[in-house]
Image (cartoon, rainbow, N blue to C red):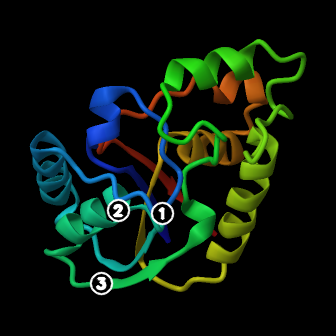
Amino acid sequence: MKLVFLRHGESEYNLRGLCNADPGVPVALTPAGRLQAQAAAERLRGLPIRRVYVSRLRRAQETAAIVNACHCAEIHVDARLDDRNTGFEGLPVTQYLNAMHGAPDPFAWKAPDGESYREMAVRVHDFLAELRGVDEPAVLVVTHHEVLQAVAGHFQNLDPARMWQVWIGNCETLEFGAG
């Protein structure tokens, strides 16, 4: 099975440099983000994608719908693919990054009402373990940057410091073969 992990297209909050992990805050794609998703759809058109997994966040769901238009695959919404709850909802990403990287153990640090990187990685690994049981030629997973860092860490056996160095741009993919 081929696993294709896709980061969502550019969102309004990406442009503004703000955090969003609350599915109740409807952060949409920008016009550029929709074009990025259409370009990703063209790149992935030839794959036999029969199943799509997507987070609960609007920007990921919009991206999945655009890419899936040429596949008509079954779409499954899964909260384990949601962006990391930083505890900085609606605040600048720089505030969150400064707080996290200033902590003695950034991997374990979490803001009040937030989620640690370690906690997020555990739920992502749980999703990946369940994905092993899927019998499809190709699966598309539409999600978020930090989730994709955890995916890369899982498949490439990276320690947390190396995971944080992985950069996945909007509508870029990570692709892996699985069992």
Write the residue at 27% across / 30% down. Answer: 15
Q: Nearer the viewer, mark 3 or mark 2?
A: 2
Amino acid under label 3?
Ala
Neighbour class for label 1 at 10 Å: few (<14), some, many (≥20)? some
Say which quarter of the image contains residue 105: top right
Write the residue at 33% across / 34% down. Answer: 14
155 relative to 47, above or below: above
Residues at circles 2 and 1 in contact by the CB criterion of under 8 Å: yes
7 relative to 97, above or below: below
Residue under circle 1?
23
Secondary structure state at the residue bearing disc 2: helix
Residue 47: x and y in percent read 27, 68
Q: Could you tell whether 98 is left or right of 32 in the image?
A: right
Amino acid under label 1?
Pro
Could you tell which of marks 2 and 1 lies nearer the N-terminus?
1
Q: CA distance from mark 3 to mark 2?
A: 18 Å
Residue 62: x and y in percent read 26, 63
Residue under circle 3?
73
Secondary structure state at the residue bearing disc 3: loop
